[in-house]
Image (spheres, helix red, strand yellow):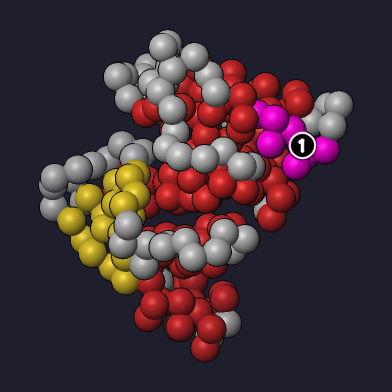
Amino acid sequence: MKNTLLILFIIGIASSCNSNSTEDVQKKLTKAEQFIQLYTLEVVPLFDEYSDLNIPEEIQIDENDLSVNAGAAFGYVEVSKGLVELKDQSIQIFVLAHELAHIATLKQAEGFNLKGELPSGSETSDYKKAEYLADLMAFYLISKNEPETYDLLKEKLNYLEELLGNGDFTHPSGSSRIESLMKYLKGMDNTSKETAFSNRFRTIWSMN
């Protein structure tokens, strides 16, 4: 994203949410401010279990991008205007959680005693593995902490597949990513949520 950016910081908005009723605040906030409130209050807490994680405290909005798009780096998250204005909050949460999951992936790998950098397979690059893992972590953390949002997302897998698109050199296709998530969901039929997550994470990590 290299277009016009609207840069917003989350601290002031989060503070205003604490000093006013939720209903009053929602009436006063712009869409961009509501989006940052969602990020601060709904998405960032999903990652509380990961210690010493550098969660970005700045949101940069690409005012010229009307697609549903986002990217995270250490220090900020850049999102499209299309994502900010999307009326589906569950999709917004998933997209933001996916981006933060990229930052938390190696922390999670350490928790599973998977050492070093994410390995590249002969058929699946490390870039594509990173996308599969971020999808998985987002779904798992949402299911664990926000079950109502998780239930909504499960009903929107076809829509998610469309949003994720055809894929490219660094991103698997939407159909491949949803197929990967379905393997995690089916894994919970015979085991716990945590075990299914661990099994799927390890499988993706070691893909050829």
Give amino acid for label 1. Thr
Q: Position of residue 105 (x, y in %)?
A: 49, 44
Q: Position of residue 25 (x, y in %)?
A: 49, 77
Horizontal side of residue 63 vs 25, given as left or right: left
Figure quadrant of residue 125: top left
Q: Position of residue 201 (x, y in %)?
A: 61, 33
Quadrant of the image for the N terminus? top left
Q: Which residue is mark 1?
A: 195
Q: Can you name the residue that lies furthest to the bottom here?
A: 19
Magenta part of the protein: which range?
192-200
Figure quadrant of residue 182: top right
Figure quadrant of residue 190: top right
Which residue lies at the image location 21% right of the left edge and 51% below the top edge?
A: 63
Which residue lies at the image location 31% right of the left edge and 52% below the top edge?
A: 73
Q: Look at the magenta stretch and give its main secondary structure.
A: helix
Which residue lies at the image location 57% right of the left edge and 59% below the top edge?
A: 50
Q: Is residue 15 magenta?
A: no
Name above or below for residue 123 compared with residue 49. Answer: above
Which residue lies at the image location 18% right of the left edge and 56% below the top edge?
A: 5
